[in-house]
Image (tube, rainbow, N blue to C red):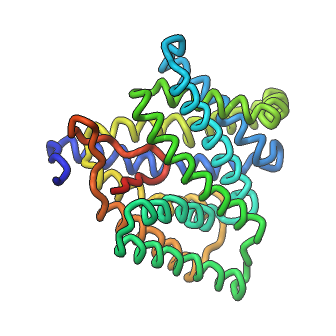
Amino acid sequence: MSDAPAPPRGVGVGVLLVVGSCMSLPFGAAVATTIFPALGSWGVTGIRVLIAALVVLLIARPRVTRWDRKKWIAAALFGVAMAFMNGTYYAALDRIPIGAAVAIEFLGPLVLAAVLTRRLLDAVWVGVALLGMALLGVDALIGSAALDPIGVLFALAAAAFWVFYIRMGARVSALLPGTEGLAMSLAVAAVLLLPFGIPATAKAVQDPDILLLALVTAVLASVIPYTLELAALRRLPQRLFGILLSLEPVFATIAGVLVLHQSTTPLRLAAVALVVIASIGVTAGSRPRRGAGGQELPPPMTGGISVIPD
């Protein structure tokens, strides 16, 4: 069964919302890297998630007294995934260009989609993405600016935690409709990151410029993307939503060049292009998830890609 068509006007607005999210996320990450020297990558992660948690908690005001044990466990595990996915991703950004980091991180949802669907075509798309990673490896060996191997390992760890994030996000969205689950999961993530967040916050409040950049990071990398994506999901078919989100590596590369003045090479651009093509292929070939009553369910929110397994 195909996705239900949305009104043309709604589709146009939805496209703009997703593009806005794709632009906001990498530019927020680019701003974050400018305060890594002062707060450290994990410190920036901690303060960003703490600010985002406070904002979303104030908006959602979850009624946790009505939750059962199953909902609490799901929200807690989602928070664990959120904390370490963001932490390892920012640790990667501290060592390698943002475009390369996002491209490597995309391996997580791509491999997950291929494993869950067991379709030959999805395996082909994963192969296309792996070819892109091979180009990054070649570029690291022969390029003028080799990729830091520790940074690559952090990006691969972020990809693995992204898989955990997607799986737990799907469970939270099923058990806790709306933003209540997201709010408490962010709170759990903030608590886990407190050993890094508290010292970073203490430093940030002593320097108004750093505090402002931390606030900008939280807004651009968390608050705005989640808000825009949730609004877009009400207007767009799932496949179009996922395909548009698959363009994030392109915006990440642009953010790296414009904000951080990071150099790029033809091989890195080709690698990003292959990852984008693979992401679009996996998303376009997926089938929408259905609830018990046959209604179409939204894809799990990932802050970067929608993975809708068969």
* Residue drawn at the location 66% of the way across and 59% of the way down: 260
Quarter of image, res 104: bottom right
Along the viewing direction, whichever of 247 and 118 lies nearer the viewer: 118
| Residue 124 is at least partly visible in this image | yes
* Figure check: 158 above or below 180: below
Residue 259 % position (x, y)? 62, 56
Lateral position of residue 159 relative to residue 66, left or right: right
Q: Is residue 34 left or right of residue 18?
A: right
Quick check: 162 left or right of 234?
A: right
Name the residue nearer the viewer: 53 or 223.
53
**Residue under the image location 28 percent in, 51 percent down:** 288
Quadrant of residue 266 within the rendered picture = bottom right
- Give the camera-side residue of 17 and 151: 151
Q: Residue at x 34, y 36 (%)?
A: 231
Residue under the image location 29 percent in, 54 percent down: 240
202 sits left or right of 267 in the view: right
Total residue callouts? 0
Q: Position of residue 26 (x, y in %)?
A: 55, 53
Residue at the extreme bottom of the image, as rendered? 142
Q: Quadrant of the C terminus?
A: bottom left
- Mark yes or no: residue 13 visible: no
- Residue 186 placed where, x, y %? 60, 31
Residue 151 in the image: state x and y as whole percent: 74, 64
